[in-house]
Amino acid sequence: MEDGGDDELESWLAGREGFDPSASFVDQANVADPGIYAAFAEEWPACWEAAAELLSWGRRWEAVLDESDAPRYRWFVDGRLNAAHNCVDRHVESGLKNHAAIRWVGKRDETLTYTYGDLQRETAAFAAALRELGVGEDDVVTLYLPMIPELPIAMLACARIGAPHSVVFAGFSADALATRMNAAGSRFLVACDGYYRRGDAINHKGKVDRAVRRVDGDVQTVVVDRLGEDLPHSLAAGQHDYDALVERHRGATVEPVIRDSEDDLFVMYTSGTTGQPKAVRHTTGGYLSYVAWTSRAVLDVKPDDTYWCSADIGWITGHSYIVYGPLALGTTTLIYEGTPEYPEKDRVWELVERYGVDVFYTAPTAIRAFMKWGAEYPDRHDLSSLRLLGTVGEPINPRAWRWYHEHIGGGECPIVDTWWQAETGGMMITTLPGVGTMKPGSAGPPLPGIDARVVDREGAEVDPGEAGYLTITRPWPGMLRGLAGDDDRFVDEYWAPYSDPLADEWVYFPGDRATVDEDGYVTLLGRVDDVITVSGHRLGTMELESAIVGVEGVAEAATVGAAGELIAYVSTEQGRPGDAALREAVVDELRRVVGDVAVPDHVVFTPELPKTRSGKIMRRLLEDIATGEELGDISALRNPEVIGELRARLAGELQSYLEPG
Ligand code: WTA
């Protein structure tokens, strides 16, 4: 596919060009009636019964929404259900027993298929094992596992017995794990011995052992043996082999524990503006209804599909759209342990072809990598099984959108650019693929039943095309219910800024800047706070910077995300050169304190960081320098001479990065 001319590109960039879904897509779409927007608006909040009705309930709710203690909203009040029953058992009972629930592909191309029947047996056995270790209802179980089948099995086993899980991304450090376990008061951990990276055996259990020593109280740890002979490990007191435990409970029936709609299904730690991660609480009824509904309406998931979301289950995207949403709908969800470029750069497309993937959902950072590698890799494979594509995590630039559309979607598949966050539980702003026109670069209109507005500092709606703060003006079933252990922070951080307590009007503030066009399409412009998203991972700049300044020789640090890469600008103490040794120390410290995800793509040493006259580091400027953007207003900058210096150093850094050694 040739690139279009400049004019065409211009109109893409302006976001004016729209794409309508094909008639054949619309014909088969789960949601194809444009009237759904008006219907949801008229029937709000009762419209959300449509989401709850996708699930099976032990007791139906008395009221859809209770607003009496706003912003502590309650959904599907007094309803009772169990999430594992909804994701597994009910499908077994309704004829999907032998239908594939999970297809797993490991890093060494091992493959496994779990039918819904298998999944029921595995989760019941592991649920019984957790009980044997003493896990009771409402005990938080921490899961620290890579993308292996035991992770969703453990999540569902927890859900089965009413124990909220807290999944900690396997790339996080021992420190990060211990901090999260202590904050959650979690005394149960499920982990593994290690995993493969590019064919090498990586020791994970070392991190587990270090973390457990730092957790207050006795911890019971279950260890999955992923590596076998490749990395033998031993078990200490309080550590149990997964297989041996499960073997003891084979054939156990563990009745799903019936939970209140508002009972926690899980907590998820996510980065905030301060150094301390926040524990977002998601509930059984509202969350599960919402992810099932959005999987159905936006991802167009059908039971006969093979659906693939390439996120890691350790993040919210994996929770909502690898595990809970797809399994609630009885589809086949593909779980891929590996990376997209190993053993070859056509790995993803090879798997799409092999499994006849119908719906593929990934992040813009991955699409940009595919684009860089070139169309020859997807061109090697038959991708005609694909019906719908999706993206999540950051804005997708029109050029990448178009490449995805042409080279992966064959010019046919609609693309849903889905804006949402860990706190929202599920998608909030995106086109309905069977209904709306897609505009590359814009996420789309708010979903039916979602009321999103872009406002200025005073809370007044901005004109089309003007930048402002994104707000959500009505609650929704998938919303977080609070921050575990920090109720005040929940209200202050998300609900205070534009809320008028006297008028009893609460507005949710996600922390994103946006514009909205005449058609009500929202284009996201980035975060307002100090949170950066790199490769779909959300990191707090405070967390990163406080780790870096802990290194001897470092004076100050500022971290920014630019084009999906993490850049650390580091000023050194007087007389201390920014050399390879210091760079290594910075990287090691980030790895130790935060984890592998925090290893920067570039470290740029500089004598000084750009600061405002009031002494604040100008992060926006550092971002613009990194992306080569025109610099915005720099009148507040105290030390403008630093700009040229930084540009030169960044260029040098990029050069040495391109030509290592
Ligand atoms: C950003 C990931 C633009 C946004 C599901 C949000 C996006 C943060 C998009 C949440 C999108 C997510 N377009 N920006 N389609 N999706 N974001 O909690 O800044 O890891 O607030 O959830 O990612 O990141 P989180």
Image: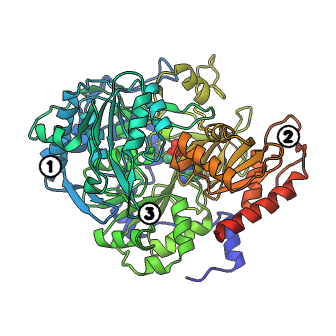
Residue 221 falls left or right of residue 39:
left
Label 2–label 1 contact, CB within 8 A = no
**Residue 214, percent across and down?**
45, 28
Give how far across and how far down residue 411 sits, in percent.
Answer: 48, 75
Q: Is 96 left, or right, of 612 in this rendering?
A: left
Q: Residue at image x 23%, y 34%?
A: 160
Viewport quadrant of the C terminus = bottom right
User: Mark 3 touching mark 2, by CB under 8 A?
Assistant: no
**What element does badge 2 sit on?**
loop
Residue under label 3, please give it.
Answer: 389
The residue beneath circle 1 is: 117
Residue type for callout 1: Gly
Disc 2 versus disc 1: nearer the observer: 2
User: Residue 207: where, in percent of width, then height?
Assistant: 42, 41
Residue 452's quadrant in the figure?
top right
Q: Which residue is mark 2?
A: 612
Q: Is residue 307 above or below residue 638?
A: below
Task: Report crowding for label 3: few under 14, some 14 to 19, many 20 or more residues within 10 A (C-alpha).
Answer: many
Q: CA distance from mark 3 to mark 2?
A: 43 Å
